[in-house]
Image: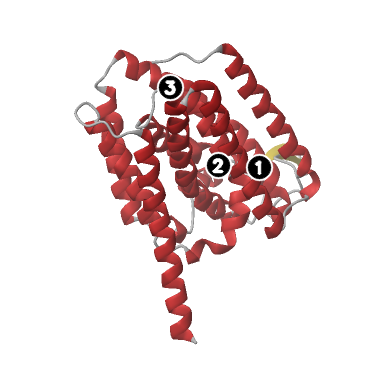
Amino acid sequence: MQSTPSWAWVVFWALLLALLVVDLLAHRGGRGQSRRAAVLWSLAWVGLGLGFCGFVWVTLGTERGHEYLAAWLIEKSLSLDNVFVFLVIFRSLNVPQRYQHEVLFLGIFGALVFRALFIFVGAAALQRWGWVSYVFGAILLVTAWRVFREDPSKQEDNRVVGWLSRKLPVTDQVEGPHFVVKHRGRRLATPLLLALVGLEVTDILFAVDSVPAAFSVTTDTFILYSSNAFAILGLRALYLVIAGAVGQLKYLHYGLAGVLAFAGVKMVVETWVHIPPLLSVAIIVAVIGGAVGASLAHRRSVHQVEA
């Protein structure tokens, strides 16, 4: 496997830190919460993700550019599952929109840390034990079947948040921007803290699926982590865009299941059949695009019948 020069890591970490600071400052005080602003920010994050693909392409070669693009598309599409869970958590805890950005920002920061751990440990395991790829493939296939059967947009509660609500002393309502408050000499968690923990635990569970999916196109830690990071950075804006349209994407979970199944099969058969990264890109775009197109067509047909 081709090594990544140290300067490329320096460029990536500097850019990642700068983008985190920009995102934090740009939305401080509840700014940029409108749907229009969220759409513009989503487009900006997509542009940055693709722009970094160009950087990889030019500096590290065409093959690694294709690998980055495939891994980024996988993570970007599977991150939609996270968005559905964010919506369930915030609704179940009645978290006002003006406080959601801080929770999402901290949740995304935690996700970047945990994804790094998963990726570097997973890469080391794959390099040492080749059979781990079959374990990852099996996990992806099982997850694909679960996602195929369960529509995440119809979830009404989150098990992690429900369990924490029963185990921790929690205030009945949000106490401003505070995660912990003191009441009658006792420290109590607020719904914001429950939401943050729920987001972190859920992302760890999702990472068990999405990180192996990215491993199906590359084992390069630089490509894996940078693609994960740029896919995750846009989750806050993506949440605001999709939150109001969850019920309109009726068939999206079938597309997500298709991506997971493709990644699982790819990992299992890679020893005998090599699927080039660029072909992986085409398959992922076709699967997700088909699911979104079918969802929009269904929505139009329903509106025509109602009219």
Question: For the residues marked 1 and 3, what is the alpha-carbon distance in whole angstroms?
Answer: 31 Å
Give the camera-side residue of 121 and 283: 283
Question: For the residues marked 2 and 1, what is the alpha-carbon distance in whole angstroms?
Answer: 9 Å
- In the image, taking residue 88 as reference, residue 142 lies left or right, namely left
Circle 2 Cα neighbour tier, 10 Å, few/some/many (<14 / 14–19 / ≥20): many
Q: Nearer the viewer, mark 1 or mark 3?
A: 3
**Mark 1 vs 3: CB contact within 8 A:** no
Question: Which residue is pictured at 36% across the width and 52% down the height?
Answer: 287
Per the image, the residue denoted by label 1 is 103
- Indicate the position of residue 221 as horizontal and vertical percent values: 46, 21
Quick check: 99 above or below 59?
below
**Mark 2 vs 1: CB contact within 8 A:** yes
Q: Quadrant of the N terminus?
A: top left
User: Of marks 1 and 3, which one's residue comes earlier in the chain?
Assistant: 1
- Indicate the position of residue 145 as horizontal and vertical percent values: 28, 49
Q: Secondary structure at mark 2?
A: helix
Per the image, the residue denoted by label 2 is 199
- Indicate the position of residue 154 as horizontal and vertical percent values: 44, 61
